[in-house]
Image (cartoon, rainbow, N blue to C red):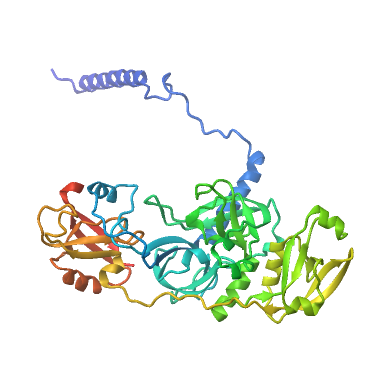
Amino acid sequence: MYDPLKAKVRVAVITAAAFLTGLGVVSGLGWTNHSLDLPTQSEEVQVSQAAIQPALDLSDAFANVADVVTPAVVRIETRRPPQASRGRAQQMDPELFRRFFGPDGIPGGEGGEPQPQLSGGSGFVVGGDGHILTNDHVVSGADRVTVYLHDGRTFPARIVGTDPLTDVAVIKIDAGESLPHLTFGDADAVRVGEWVLAIGNPGFAGGQPLDYTVTAGIVSARGRGLNLLAQDLSQETQGYAIEDFIQTDAAINPGNSGGPLVDIRGRVIGINSAIASATGFYQGYGFAIPINLARRVMEDLVEYGHVKRAMMGVRIGAITPEDAQMYGLPSVSGVLVNEVTAEPAQNAGIKSGDVIVAIEGKPVAYAGQLQQRVAQYHPGDQIAVTLYRNKRPMDVKVRLAEAPINTEAPRVAEREPVAEERLGIQVQPLTRENMEQFGWEQPGGVIVSNVEPGSAASRRLGPGVKILAINDQPVSSTEQIGQILSRVDSGEIVSLRIEIPELAGGGQRIANLRMP
């Protein structure tokens, strides 16, 4: 006779036995907290909070500075006219197709007819109205400059002015609103050993995104002259180049050039400009233009389009220990006047053999510092110069003149790109004459003939791919492509259906690009 109570007891016993058996199996597999096969995990703090608090505070300070500064740092992409010396067209190597879609390559622009030179760097917004400070070598000679903001927006920029004698340039974008911008510190007050952060937006390196790089270090030295700027200048202007760099061990690489070097309070003390390296990449030494000099240059570039450079009118040299003894200097410091070359110094009574030791009461220790001190004044300003003569100090007044080397800076060309150039591509019909060059067995349709490195298309397309449709609209001619793309506004997504030659793997793909 069926007994419900006994049945329930039997089920409970079987269930308990099964549970215990399973627990034993699980334990044997190491799935329990008491497994002998896995070590016991612990989250216990190994070092006391008090012992690491200074490091935590410094880490928080770095993070806070990065949070404040990064929104004002921009990526700058430039295009320069093609070099006439580039070789004639070369046939495409099928091996290149594989690289076009690999993780390490940025397609396009290699070989073929002379191509525009594309490069990039960093910059930072210095006014809510869109003025941006960067390096002269980042933008000089460009016929197109594009700025990428922290929030993903892009804007064409115009070159306000450039100054190769200090490697400073100013560009401007019209964003239609106030932008995050940085404040200036005092480079003269920076001390060796002080913590600094170098911030840049290099964009891409080796095909991989490297947006917004922050590196930390200390000020390693001040007043470094590298003789870098003068190498690219004419004999007439070499003597006016100002090299008075801040040296730092914060990593600075080529794409970070033009970005800010900031102190621990987030104030700009320099513009990242150069590296000392045999490879072109960071090997321990980075250099920045002092912001006091850059700010003075910026003011002239914004107001006049070029720098009105003040001139004292002396040819100068470094002080040696022998000089210091000869001229009765209190230390091996100052600038020796080798020759008086112009009226400002002549009228003030400065003579060959004088040693300049201060400008307006601020010590002058070396030639680059004297040049920077003078460059911070305007032509026509009168300055107090302290010098040593006959082993005694004396003060003279010098009214500065304007150096005869100023020229108008180049401007970005106003040429309006055709529709497909906005994406960074050139297109042409696939014909019997070019089908083998691009790896096709049959003619017909439209192919991408060239991709501009660093453009919107460069991460997704390569020369030789066939465009089948744009935004679901089939295309069979270059005219159709131009018509469709001309109706796409900046910031909108363009969806391309493309076909790849068999030599590059074949098949169809979809490439979604944002129109710059």
State whether residue 370 appears in this view.
yes
Question: Depth check: 307 or 238 in front?
Answer: 238
The quarter of the image holding the C terminus is: bottom left
Among the 4 quarters of the image, the one containing residue 343 = bottom right
Question: Depth check: 22 or 5 in front?
Answer: 22
In the image, residue 328 sits, relative to residue 59, either above or below, namely below
In the image, residue 48 sits, relative to residue 322, either above or below, namely above
State whether residue 331 appears in this view.
no
The quarter of the image holding the N terminus is: top left
Could you tell me residue 299's position as x and y percent?
Answer: 59, 76
Is 332 on the left-hand or right-hand side of 124?
A: right
Could you tell me residue 45's position as x and y percent?
Answer: 57, 35
Question: Number of labelled discs?
Answer: 0
The residue positioned 42% from the left and 57% from the top of the image is 203
Is 447 on the left-hand or right-hand side of 328?
A: left
Is 419 on the left-hand or right-hand side of 266?
A: left
Among the 4 quarters of the image, the one containing residue 417 = bottom left
In the image, residue 116 sits, relative to residue 34, either above or below, namely below
Question: Depth check: 145 or 484 in front?
Answer: 145
Could you tell me residue 67's position as x and y percent?
Answer: 53, 58
Is 226 on the left-hand or right-hand side of 8?
A: right
Could you tell me residue 77's position as x and y percent?
Answer: 42, 64
The residue positioned 60% from the left and 70% from the top of the image is 236
The residue positioned 65% from the left and 61% from the top of the image is 244
